[in-house]
Amino acid sequence: MPVTSAPGSPSAALEAVTAARWRIALSLTVAMMVVYFGFILLVAFNKPLLGRLIVPGLSLGVLLGALVIVAAWVLTWIYIHWANTHYDAHLRGLRS
Amino acid sequence: MIGGGETNVVAIGFFLAFIALSLGITVWASRKTQTADSFYTAGRSVTALQNGLALAGDYMSAASFLGIAGLVALSGFDGLIYSVGWLVGWPVVMFLIAEPLRNLGRYTFADVVAARLRQKPVRIASAIGSLAVISFYLIAQMVGAGNLIRLLFGLPYEFAVVIVGVVMLAYVLFGGMTATTWVQIVKAVLLLGGATLLALLVLARFSFNPLALFAEATRQYGDGVLGPGRLVSDPVDAMSLGLALMLGTAGLPHILMRFYTVPDARTARTSVGYATAFIGFFYLLTFILGFGAMVLIGRDAITAVDAGGNMAAPLLAAGVGGRPFFGFISAVAFATILAVVAGLTLSGAATLSHDLWVNVVRHGETNSREELVVARGATVALAIVSITLGILFKGQNVAYMVGLAFAIAASANFPVLVLSIFWSRLTTAGAQASTIVGTVTALVLIWLSPAIQIDVLKHTEAWFPLRNPGIVSIPLAFAVAMLVSWLRPVPAEEQAFHALERRIHLGAE
């Protein structure tokens, strides 16, 4: 069990940072897994759907594959943005 | 005919230029490599962009450049499944590992696990996991190097393996992490630049419209090339491979070690951002290169040179850029192998000297000078072992070995690393049991899988139905760690976690 402490104390601030970092790390990891395994499961279970051409030269499968790479970029960008604005500010607070 | 195994003068010229440049870097780096700290971490002075490039250079192996381009050329969409799979581990590295690892450790990822647990048992277990990953990865790279160099340059297999081993030894032995980092940066720039140029030369023939290229592929080979084929026939196996690729990236010792080369956690974070951008961009390029080779070179011409399709990208370079460009891309492929092998050897040397010698044999009581001597000795030993294994495994199908390295990394290293950062109740016994069970399960299940039993040993059936053990071995490693820790809680180790909590976020102050 986490050591409980009075609100406003230094260790309460530390716990708040730990909880916030854990929440965002876990949600983004789960988001990446959902996107990637969603893609893999579609490949495994609905091959005709992914083989369907949206326009000549572009199938849904190729489009979604490229979008998984784009999703990885977007999720890492979200994390960096969160960390640079919120996490680093909390850390400055912890240091002082 | 190009790439048939005859001596290729232009390619060898480019390759010698790369060797000269990289040995020049090594001489410069050797002056900065005077202490164990500089040997392992390049003085922690690498910038975010430099480390992002070096991470990309450490990770993008010849398998991903030549192998995936060839797979896409021969099987279309199915090859893209790998392109995507090799990337998705990077966000996980960023979210869960990079910053706490930088804040808690010094040289190896075992530092993080050992930060609040008992040193000896944890270091020994982590060393087993690390060395298993490094060995299989090294064998795959060395055998790949031997085959590739025979095809590209027309040099004999054994000669090629020895050259790779000796040049890599020079980088690591004299230049340590500084030389390794710069070789990886130069390689990443050459690989990204060369692949971009190749993709542009291909697209120039389709008025810079990738869809026109894909449409031409469907006209020549049918609509099927843009849809899933036979590669993913078993959904469970596909999930298992995906899980190993995704979580294994965050358990590769040579990748994790790179986070100690930057000054702080914030730089580590930014460097993964760069690495993810570069690696993702590179894998998007493999879409163009693979389909380009399929359309402009043709499947028959590719398999005529190498049945596995590994020559698709170099042949494409010859097709759109002539002989000099073929020589350039061949040299880039060779540089790619050297950079990966150097990173692997350096992390293996760190495991042997820092984890086993300093913290197990000498109980942490040693000086930097002795540690540097042991690390250099370990580097020489690893170079000899990898050359020997490369020659012993000549002619073997080692395609499963990279998958195996990822499976062990995901089962032995990743669960313990994540739990030691995020779960206060992890105990020494839990960490130890998890690493051993993860390593052994991954090894045994691969041995019993069709990849060994049917493909290598030519038996008619396999005991274990899946080609990749990840879906069994990864959850099992997590379960063992948690169960052992729950059954025999160690309050002192839990308190030590809370004492470390500040350091997880702020680093050593």
Image (cartoon, rainbow, N blue to C red):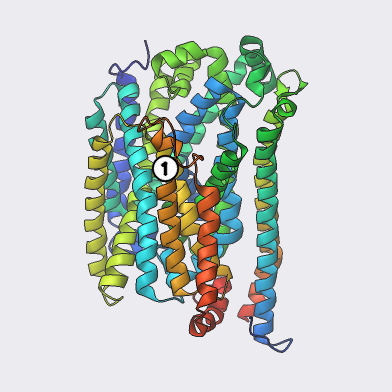
Q: Is residue B494 above or below residue B441?
A: below
Name the quadrant containing residue B331: top left
Q: Position of residue B266 (x, y in %)?
A: 57, 63
Kind of residue indicated by mark 1: Leu
Towards the viewer: B212 or A93: B212
Q: From where the camera sits, is residue B46 visible?
A: no
Q: Is residue B207 above or below residue B81?
A: above
Residue lying at 75% horizontally and 17% vertically, measured from the top left: A56
Query: What number of labels is visible?
Result: 1
Chain under disc 1 = B
Name the quadrant containing residue B184: top left
Q: Is residue B268 left or right of residue B339?
A: right
Q: Is residue A85 left or right of residue B12?
A: right
Name the quadrant containing residue B340: top left
Q: Position of residue A5 (x, y in %)?
A: 68, 88
SS at mark 1? helix
The residue under label 1 is B448
Q: Is residue A64 above or below residue B239?
A: above
Q: Is residue B365 above or below residue B131?
A: below
Q: From where the camera sits, is residue A30 visible?
A: yes
Q: Position of residue B368 (x, y in %)?
A: 28, 70
Towards the viewer: B18 or B92: B92
Towards the viewer: B301 or B25: B301
Residue lying at 35% horizontally and 59% vertically, measured from the top left: B128
Q: Position of residue A17 (x, y in %)?
A: 67, 73
